[in-house]
Image (cartoon, rainbow, N blue to C red):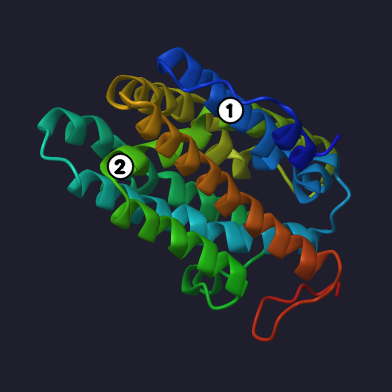
Amino acid sequence: MTRVDLDRDAPEEPLDNANALERRLRRIGATRYHNLHPFHQMLHGGTLSKGQVQAWALNRYYYQSSIPLKDAIVLSRFRDRHIRLEWRHRIEDHDGDFQTEGGIERWLKLTDGLGLDRRYVESTVGILPATRFAVDAYVHFVRDKTPLEAIASSLTELFAPNLHEERIAGMLRHYDFIHPGVMTYFQRRLEQAPRDANFALAYVREHATTPEMRQAVCDALIFKTNVLWVQLDALYHAYVTGMVPPGAFRPEEM
């Protein structure tokens, strides 16, 4: 049964309370999270070439480097100082500070280790158009939707730790060009993602107080899963089927 079949065939539980909301959110993750995408299964199963892994890491950098921009926008949506204090560490997690590296620097260690020129990666000139459109759409979503929906869109972090564990194990097992030193981004997120997800889940459980608001929370999570999924669609189309658009990164193996 496909992901779409699961979505279509299961009866929808009414969103009458916070527990029903959480069950719906977890079902969305089980049926729509991008761990189900064939490109991820190839990545973790060791069937991609080094050039294809380079293309994935290069494109994913645009997403990683946009996360603190997204979080700064979320921060600006709240007058509640306590929420701002809670959310602020997400920016520091990715940007780091003057003494500590953050997730972006850890991701650049991965692209360095894969042999990509750092200036080229940071320029983002070689990313796929669909990558740029999808990530920019996510930043615009948190700017334009309600603060509740902005927070809800981050709930993919509920499902991230299992993916990171699978990625660490699979890539270290299958690729001789991957070593533990370049996987520190994922190792750190094993601690950060559950903390962040728990706050966001508690927030939507408390503040989505009507069925309509709970549906908006679910729709926000679906939007975010689509943002993640379409990036992998683009990678598969370009680097597995071979339809690399003009101007995009071309691995040496192609």
On the image, the x and y values in percent for residue 247 come to 64, 85
Q: Earlier in the sequence, mark 1 or mark 2?
A: 2
Q: Which residue is mark 1?
A: 161
The quadrant in which the N terminus is found is top right
Residue 104 vs residue 210, the one in the foreground: 210
For disc 2, the marked residue is 92
Taking the image as drawn, is residue 151 in sight? yes
List the single residue furthest toward the bottom: 246
Amino acid at circle 1: Pro
Residue drawn 71% across the image and 81% down it: 245
* Residue 211 falls left or right of residue 135: left
Q: Residue at x 78, y 51 (%)?
A: 39
How far across and down, in percent of the image, does residue 24 sit? 55, 25
In the rendered image, which quarter is residue 243 located in? Answer: bottom right
Mark linked to residue 211 = none
Q: Tell me the residue at 69%/56% (across/down).
A: 232
Secondary structure of the residue carrying tag 1 is: helix
